[in-house]
Amino acid sequence: MGLQACLLGLFALILSGKCSYSPEPDQRRTLPPGWVSLGRADPEEELSLTFALRQQNVERLSELVQAVSDPSSPQYVGGLHRFPPTSSLRQHPEPQVTGTVGLHLGVTPSVIRKRYNLTSQDVGSGTSNNSQACAQFLEQYFHDSDLAQFMRLFGGNFAHQASVARVVGQQGRGRAGIEASLDVQYLMSAGANISTWVYSSPGRHEGQEPFLQWLMLLSNESALPHVHTVSYGDEEDSLSSAYIQRVNTELMKAAARGLTLLFASGDSGAGCWSVSGRHQFRPTFPASSPYVTTVGGTSFQEPFLITNEIVDYISGGGFSNVFPRPSYQEEAVTKFLSSSPHLPPSSYFNASGRAYPDVAALSDGYWVVSNRVPIPWVSGTSASTPVFGGILSLINEHRILSGRPPLGFLNPRLYQQHGAGLFDVTHGCHESCLDEEVEGQGFCSGPGWDPVTGWGTPNFPALLKTLLNP
């Protein structure tokens, strides 16, 4: 009998009253480290259980991800279900566009499309079997009526879909959340006219996002969207080591399968917390995982002009305290650490850790429709992440229609090509600890990669050219 059948049988016996478990008195008093007894659960309370067994050969899986995702590797296929490429292409990062493109009174789909050089023809064909997805957690839900109204207001100059193709999980019936509304509306307007799924996981893990529940669902499905965007995260130190490592293993599996997973870098800059009486920066997870593409945030240099971008001071970024620096970013990070004129003191961050973000997009001043009300000035990397994800879905559209596989895990290619096809953001710093030593400043952007905006923001025609082959 399989494990699932055994567990179901055991639960059935317990619920029927034919079987019960009564621990000995000393067992009742023994709790795992960090656990606190809150008494017996209410008999009417529903419990959601996720069984994630310990994984073996994780080191070999990590090697496999690198081999199948690195365009310079002879084993490169973009993921285990991909086929071999035919050529390779390298370019240099795109300089910022100079001059003013136009005025705006808040970021809308038309502003995104102007800034990132998307034309009205840059939409999905509807015939390519292409798809994209976003995830919603923490009792955040979108409403179909909000999406339809958003597209009526802001989607008039490009072909689009006004409804989600599929919801996987439980979609709540309460008020719409601004977070969930933002994610769906900008994924579907940047990745316009592409079939979109929403994964809804309303439960919680220790009061936080049930990332493992969502990832186990992905692992157990054979047909999935190619691009997934997630605008949620937690501080690394707020999660147990066992949980972080188990989630990271599932992220590694997704990368090996050739899924493109994008996570928001967070909205607290470098972060800050006190360790043994000293301030340190505070990295976030899953943004700090080596197996996801992490998206930071930018603002327009001139608030009401569609022009060059600078750092959005809230843009999350830094260095993981859990995961070592992956080989694919060794060159870029070493160069930053050796050349940046504004490095914080070394005691504030783990210079040998996985550095993030990898890329960025506008994160300041969005219009969102939630509960039938247009809401201005919504900001955060929750906005930049679905925008970048939608643009990658458009590139997948071209790849699929030309007989190539979708992009898969993007980071090895991204770092090998040194940010080709991206606008390099070189001005601004993000926030951190309000103390005398750093005075609220974390890291600062500069030429090439940096831990504030990564390699920069998308220039669609150039990025398409860079990523279309192999």
Image (cartoon, grey):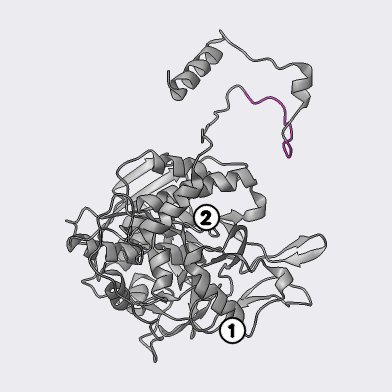
Residue tagged 1? 339
| Screen quadrant of the N terminus | top left
**Viewer-proximal residue among 398 and 389:** 398
Residue 304 covered by magenta stretch: no
Res 402 quadrant in image:
bottom left
Can you give x and y, in whole percent of width and height, for residue 266 in the image? 56, 63
Can you give x and y, in whole percent of width and height, for residue 206 in the image? 62, 41
Residue for point 50% across, 71% down: 297
Residue for point 33% across, 77% down: 90
Q: Residue furthest front?
A: 74
- The boundaries of the magenta stretch are 33-42
Circle 2: element type: loop
Tag nearer the camera, 1 or 2: 1
Residue for point 32% across, 68% down: 154
Amino acid bearing label 1? Ser
Circle 1: element type: helix
| Screen quadrant of the C terminus | bottom left
The image shows residue 298, relative to residue 85, as above or below, that is below
Predominant secondary structure, magenta span: loop
Res 419 quadrant in image:
bottom left
Amino acid bearing label 2? Tyr
Residue tagged 2? 232
